[in-house]
Image: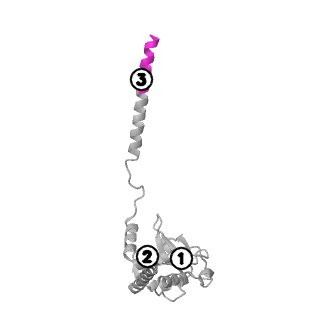
């Protein structure tokens, strides 16, 4: 009798292991069945990316600003103190256009078209200290709480990327159309020149 139970016991053990394995495989397949991202991209961030793609001048300002990350004022030939507006004007000039020609961050409040929120490639003007003080940088994106991520000068005495509290934002502006056209024309001319050099 003892011998007749052994094959039955082995069969039951094999069946239960196969069932457990099948259940685990099904559970694993169910776990990966939902491939939607856990954090959906907010509509405003998606719209910001679309708008940046449609405004090559705005994207050029951001790309130009990114080139100088880690540089300090001395390396860029800018004043050593309070130089965020100097950097913004420097970037716009390097991109092929004219900025505000002012050392005041708040001079950018009147520079272009005001936006209802952050846009990639837009300029953000923030309050800092007293009523005449401020900070300015170009928007790279936003964090999970809607705070703008800026590339700006005089951030820890260098050009760097930092998130700033959205409550400190005075305005977001897209440079005027003529500035964007100047930047686009400069980029086009540089591309043609580079293509001619390759031929």
| Secondary structure type for disc 2 | helix
Marking on residue 59 = 2
User: Are the residues flagged by discs 1 and 2 in contact, CB closer than 8 Å?
Assistant: no
Q: Position of residue 125 (x, y in %)?
A: 49, 79
102 lies left or right of 187: right
Q: Earlier in the sequence, mark 2 or mark 3?
A: 3
Q: Residue furthest front?
A: 199
Q: Nearer the viewer, residue 16 or 7?
A: 7
Q: Earlier in the sequence, mark 1 or mark 2?
A: 2
Q: Residue at x 40, y 67 (%)?
A: 45
Q: Residue at x 43, y 78 (%)?
A: 58
User: Are the residues flagged by discs 2 and 3 in contact, CB closer than 8 Å?
Assistant: no
| Secondary structure type for disc 3 | helix
Q: Residue furthest bottom?
A: 101
User: Are the residues flagged by discs 3 and 1 in contact, CB closer than 8 Å?
Assistant: no
Q: Is residue 123 magenta?
A: no
Task: List the residue tagged with mark 1.
Answer: 152
Task: List the residue tagged with mark 3.
Answer: 12
Marking on residue 90 = none
Locate the N terminus and report the quarter of the image it occupies: top left
Range shown magenta = 1-14
| Vertical comparison of 197 with 145: above or below | below
Mark 3 surroundings: few (<14), some (14-19) or many (≥20) residues within 10 A: few
| Vertical comparison of 10 with 154: above or below | above
Q: Is residue 3 magenta?
A: yes
Magenta stretch prevailing secondary structure: helix
Mark 3 or 1: in front is 3
Q: Residue at x 43, y 26 (%)?
A: 14
The CA span between labels 2 and 3 is: 67 Å
Locate the C terminus and report the quarter of the image it occupies: bottom left
């Amino acid at each position: 009798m003892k011998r007749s139970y052994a094959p039955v016991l082995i069969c039951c053990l094999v069946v239960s292991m196969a069932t457990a394995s099948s259940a685990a495989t099904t559970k694993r397949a169910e776990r990966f069945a939902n491939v939607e991202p856990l954090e959906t991209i907010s509509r405003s961030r998606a719209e910001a990316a679309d708008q940046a793609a449609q405004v090559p001048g705005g994207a050029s300002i951001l790309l130009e600003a990114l080139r100088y990350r880690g540089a300090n004022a001395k390396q860029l030939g800018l004043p050593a103190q309070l130089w965020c507006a100097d950097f913004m004007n420097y970037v716009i000039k390097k991109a092929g256009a004219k900025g505000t020609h002012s050392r005041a961050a708040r001079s950018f409040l009147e520079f272009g078209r005001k936006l209802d929120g952050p846009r990639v490639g837009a300029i953000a003007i923030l309050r800092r200290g007293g009523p005449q003080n401020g900070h300015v940088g170009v928007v790279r994106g936003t964090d999970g709480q809607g705070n703008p991520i800026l590339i700006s000068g005089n951030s820890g005495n260098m050009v760097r990327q930092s998130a700033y509290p959205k409550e400190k934002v005075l305005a977001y502006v897209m440079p005027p159309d003529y500035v964007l056209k100047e930047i686009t024309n400069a980029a086009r001319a540089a591309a043609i020149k580079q293509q001619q050099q390759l031929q």
